[in-house]
């Protein structure tokens, strides 16, 4: 996948989920675990595990249970980057998380000026 926003570069979600299922299966096998054993340890049915490994279908809860059973649940938070603001943002220093996003009201094509210049003082 390239960095462009071209629609032809986007991998279908179904394909990504199938890849995730295959990775789950490969990891389980590398740990020498049978489907029934992992399913039991995760508290899900073997059928649910087979569906996830084969088609990539399942819930986030199921996925998290499987990661915990495989003792890699600490990696779950690696999927989404930390939403901490930029180190240059003063809110980061004060450890105050953003509460909302505000859109700039000014026209992006207007060059920046000092406020007193804009007011005519």
Image: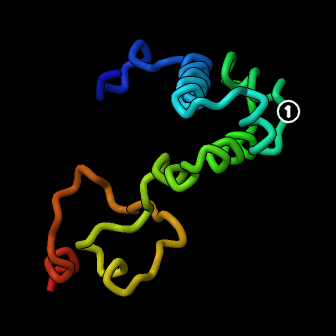
Q: In percent of the image, x 83 and y 39: which residue is there? A: 44
The N terminus - image quarter = top left
In the image, residue 80 lies at what x, y percent? 48, 50
Q: In percent of the image, x 47 and y 72: which residue is there? A: 98
Quadrant location of residue 55? top right
**Residue most toward the top?**
8
Question: Does 39 appear above or below 89?
Answer: above
- Does residue 13 appear anywhere in the picture? no
In the visual, does 26 lie left or right of 94? right
In the visual, does 51 lie left or right of 98? right
Q: Secondary structure at mark 1?
A: loop
Q: Which residue is mark 1?
A: 45
Question: Does 31 appear above or below 43?
Answer: above
In the image, residue 37 lies at what x, y percent? 75, 35
Question: Does 75 appear above or below 55?
Answer: below
Q: Which colour scheme appears in the figure?
A: rainbow
Q: In percent of the image, x 29 and y 74: which residue is there? A: 89
- Does residue 79 appear anywhere in the picture? yes
The one nearer the camera, 10 or 61, is 61
Question: Does 89 appear above or below 70?
Answer: below
Q: In percent of the image, x 20 and y 74: which residue is there? A: 118
**Mark 1 Cα shell of 10 Å, populated few (<14), some (14-19), many (≥20):** some
In the image, residue 20 lies at what x, y percent? 56, 27
In the image, residue 8 lies at what x, y percent? 41, 12
């Amino acid at each position: 996948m390239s960095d462009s926003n071209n629609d032809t570069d986007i991998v279908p979600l179904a394909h990504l989920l199938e890849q995730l299922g295959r990775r789950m299966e490969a990891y389980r096998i590398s740990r020498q675990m049978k489907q029934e054993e992992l399913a039991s340890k995760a508290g899900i049915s073997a059928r649910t595990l087979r569906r996830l490994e084969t088609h990539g279908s399942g819930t986030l809860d199921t996925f998290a249970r499987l990661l915990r059973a495989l003792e890699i649940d600490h990696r779950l938070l690696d999927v989404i980057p930390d939403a901490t603001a930029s180190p240059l943002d003063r809110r980061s220093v004060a450890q105050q998380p953003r509460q909302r996003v505000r859109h700039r009201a000014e026209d992006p094509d207007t060059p920046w000026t000092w406020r007193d210049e804009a007011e005519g003082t």
